[in-house]
Structures are given as structure tokens and as C-alpha cells.
């Protein structure tokens, strides 16, 4: 069977008694791609359904493209995250800047 099908097609008649499997059907699907974006991009060795969309967007756009695009799915871990406002973020650099400005105001270097 391998010899008859190694070029991608069977040289026997349409009534061939052997089952011919597509070699690409054995390739594992890319889980990241199924969620909407594969970080490996075009270099991904796993199967992607739509090769133009492998970088995360289709150059034709969903409206003008006749092929299926994967849905954008946010993983469960990321769905628990929330965005913070800038004033909610406390960093060492921010604290040092606040202390420097406070000391400058207290010393009269900056008017209050």
C-alpha cells in the first residue's frame, strides 16, 4: 500500500481494496491556533486549518474571505485577569518618584 500511495495518489483502479489515509490527517492540530493565534506563526509544525490566518489575522479580512477563520478564544487563566488603572499600579520607581516630589515640595523646591 505504501508504494502505491507514496506519491499522494493510488495508481490502482478506483476499486482499490486498500484504505488510503491522507498523511496530513496524522499531524496534531495546533491548540494555540484553535484559540485564535499561534505564537510560532508560519514556522508551526502542527496542523493549522487556514494557512493565511496563522499569524493571527487574515489579509483579506473575514468579510472578503471565503475560508473559515478560527474564533478568538481567551483561555480561562486570562479571563480572570483585569486591567488596572495607572494609579493602582505601585512600583518601586513610582514610589521613589512620589517620595522625591514630596521632599521637593517640603523643602520648597517645588511650589505646592
Image (cartoon, rainbow, N blue to C red):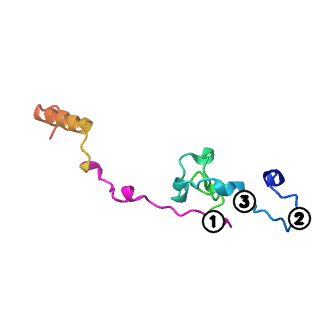
Quick one: 96 or 38, which is closer to the camera?
A: 38
Q: CA distance from mark 1 to mark 3?
A: 23 Å
Q: CA distance from mark 2 to mark 1?
A: 34 Å
Q: Nearer the viewer, mark 2 or mark 1?
A: 2
Residue 34 is situated, as x and y percent measured from the top left of the image, at 54, 59
- Return the disc, 2 or 1, that comes first in the chain's sequence: 2
Residue 67 is situated, as x and y percent measured from the top left of the image, at 67, 65
Q: Are marks 1 and 3 in contact (CB under 8 Å)?
A: no
Quick one: 75 or 106, which is closer to the camera?
A: 75
Q: Is 73 covered by the magenta stretch? A: yes
Residue 14 is situated, as x and y percent measured from the top left of the image, at 86, 67
- For mark 3, give the secondary structure: loop
Residue 13 - label: 2
- For mark 1, give the secondary structure: loop
Residue 68 - label: 1
Count the marks: 3
Residue for badge 3? 21
Q: Residue furthest front?
A: 17
- Return the disc, 3 or 2, that comes first in the chain's sequence: 2
Identify the magenta region.
62-87
Image quadrant holding the N terminus, namely: bottom right
Amino acid at each position: 500500500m505504501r508504494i502505491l500511495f507514496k506519491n499522494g495518489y493510488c495508481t490502482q483502479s478506483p476499486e482499490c481494496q486498500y484504505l488510503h489515509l491522507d498523511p496530513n490527517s496524522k499531524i496534531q492540530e495546533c491548540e494555540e491556533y484553535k484559540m485564535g493565534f499561534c505564537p510560532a506563526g508560519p514556522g508551526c509544525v502542527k496542523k493549522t486549518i487556514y494557512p493565511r490566518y496563522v499569524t493571527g489575522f487574515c489579509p483579506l479580512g473575514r468579510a472578503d474571505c471565503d475560508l473559515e477563520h478560527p474564533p478568538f478564544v481567551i483561555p480561562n487563566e486570562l479571563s480572570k485577569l483585569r486591567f488596572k488603572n495607572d494609579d493602582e499600579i505601585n512600583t518601586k520607581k513610582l514610589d521613589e518618584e512620589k517620595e522625591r516630589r514630596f521632599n521637593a515640595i517640603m523643602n520648597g523646591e517645588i511650589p505646592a
